[in-house]
Image (spheres, rainbow, N blue to C red):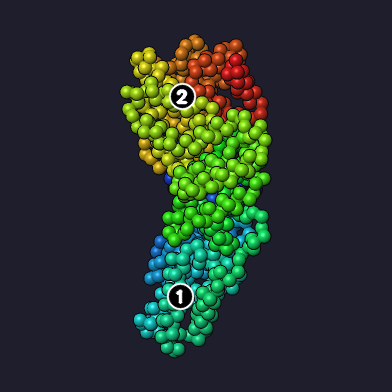
Amino acid sequence: MSIQIKKEPGLGSNGPGSVGHPVEVKKEPSFSDSTSVKTQLESKVKLTLMQAWRERWTEIQWAIQLKKLLAAYSGESVDIAEILMQQALVGSSPNMLILSYLKHSVLSLMIPFNTVMLYITKFEDFSRPHCVLALIRLTGVFGLKISLSPCQDSPLQLVRTMLKLVHWLVKALLNCLQRLSDTRQSIMIQEYFEIMDDSSRSIVSILERQPVKGLLLIARMDSPEEYREFEQSEMNARGIMSQIPASALPEETREKISSALTLLSKLEEQEVHSETVLEVIHAPIIPTINGIVALEAILNPSSDLQPFVDQVLMVSRLMKLSMSHLCLELFRACFMGFMDTVDFSEVLPWAIFTFLKVPHILNNMKQQMPNWEMNYDVEKGLNMLLEYTNLLDQTDIRHSFDMMGQFILELHKAKILTEDQKNTFSQKRGEQRSKLRQSDITGSSDSKNLSRVTQAEGTVNSILKSLDTDPPRNFEGMVKVLTIMMQRHSFDMLRLAAACTGQLHDFMTKLIRINELSSQASNDTVRLSNWSQLFDVTFIMVISTFQQHGLEIALPSRENDASLVMNWARRWLPENGKYKNSELVTGEEQDKVDYILKLMLSKSDITPCGPIQSWKELIKYLPYALQEVIYAMEHLSISMDQVKEIIDNICKQNMKSFIVVGTTYLCSYMNMVGVNARAKPRRMLEMLILSLDS
């Protein structure tokens, strides 16, 4: 498919958006590799940039064409800031036109402030004064736009970038002062004096803003090593400045540098722990920690522990929480999460997080703080948690399970609590539970599933070992194990357990490897049947995991990237609520599509045979066959009875992967065509649902 971007109607050659030549955007259809598409998009952006430079486009013209180009590649991202910076700083002097495009893109919020400022701080070739001067002037513009209001940038990343930016300005000033002290004023070129002027002015204008001071104060606590380097650069600049004779610097420049150094010294004099950011002595809960815990448990089950631990410790320092109070907040947030659930599918992520991940989090915090008396603070936090009797009772009643008792056992297993502490807490909680009616805390099917959660980590380890065996030698046992895993909530439980223990990527890699091996056809009928089951169950497991955690959970891995299931998911699986383009182009493989149609119409088993050599080809060409059925329905060359026979034949194959592939294509097709054309694929979906129900 080729899309051509043309001039807007009604705009003359001098109007905004007019260009000398249209920008052609080509997009490849099925099974396109996302890496090649991204590379193609980067190339298009660079070509558009070169065209803009040759034809001297205005900033508005550049922005219009860039937005059109990015719209043609919806779903793909490219680092526009990096491309513009690379092209603008090629020679000894900057390309001011391209820098103006960069400035306009940032101010119009096409590019986040944080991204550009980060690239500016990475430029350390101070032997190119013209480039340094241009970048300093950009920081003077961008620095004034920084605020704490909602923006595209991550707040913590913005904090770190602001520290890097001010540090970079100090280093630019320090470099010029060193050059001045090593040479005579007559030898030093004028641009270095301008750098000193502008860098000092930028430092003053940035540090005079109260929000920036707050950001740098947070950065001082978040990145102490980087902040010490920043302080050292400032001290070096102050030392060299004191040694430079008064006659070596113009009076105006000296005053600007002195003002900047004075503001920097005041920044260092700020007391980090002078006052709490938020007074929490009488607060019933800490909403910030509750929010962080909820995000981690529900939305980020596969994320690393370190970012979460860093965030929690940062909040505790800002709010001056004791470690025992922090433990209480973590534990209480987990039990509040249990209360906010309706069915077991919602309980499961909280159970995995509370029983499996929290002990790992506490041990990680102990590694970061070797002097922390973890045992003492956890004990104190649990004692405070036991005071929330109503919360603990309601949690047990809702799920008919001793949540607190199980949590205490898991902390003991992780060697966070001693045997005596475990017995003491179990006795205290037992006395509280004895006051509840027995009928309120027994009789739920979820209680059995919750008791299995604590065994999930060990089960994942044993399954990973069994998946290492050679499938051809042990495929019957492997099919049996994987089929059992798919029953009820077992797979979700194991998937979340693998995610919270950092083993999900390894789990996915093994499943994808087995899926690839089982996708090959076999002449043995019995063997083919077992291979089909193994292929089907692994395909469903991998796709289900992709839906929950995204395709990146299987990357980076060259083998995974080239696999059938990854290619299919990249081509068809909806992402972020958006369906993929369903347009297909039949080519030289039409004989395979026709053969699949023949199998579906003849009520035969849909298995690899004839020109179809593997399950991989069946999955790949099944959407093409369904496309032919839709076209035949539109041209009235096939009856609805025949369509129903095709759908029934697909359903009776006992291959859930066929159902997933077929429904995904039909839904994608319905989202691409107009309202009038949706009736026939919708009818096919209704037939599919009825056939499955029967």
**Helix, strand or loop at disc 1?**
helix
Q: Does the CB distance between marks 1 and 2 fall below 8 Å?
A: no
How many numbered marks are there?
2
Q: Which residue is mark 2?
A: 483
- Residue 646 lies, with reference to residue 501, above or below; the image says above
Is residue 364 visible in the rendered structure shown here?
yes
Q: Nearer the viewer, residue 106 or 554?
A: 554
In the rendered image, the quadrant that contains the C terminus is top right
The disc label shown at residue 234, or none = 1
Picture coordinates of residue 206, whole percent (x, y): 56, 70
Left or right: 465 in relation to 652: left
CA neighbours of label 1 inside 10 A, class few (<14), some (14 to 19), many (20+): many
Mark 1 or 2 closer to N-term?
1
As measured in the structure, the alpha-carbon distance from the residue carrying label 1 to the one carrying label 2 is 64 Å
- Residue 354 lies, with reference to residue 515, above or below; the image says below
Picture coordinates of residue 293, whole percent (x, y): 57, 49
Q: Nearer the viewer, residue 485 or 366?
A: 366
Left or right: 82 in relation to 146: left
Q: Nearer the viewer, residue 454 or 562?
A: 454
Picture coordinates of residue 233, whole percent (x, y): 43, 73
What amino acid type should be assigned to the residue bearing mark 2? Thr
Q: Residue at x 49, y 16 (%)?
A: 653
Where residue 370 sits, quadrant-wise, is: bottom left
Q: Look at discs 1 and 2 and give the one toward the viewer.
A: 2
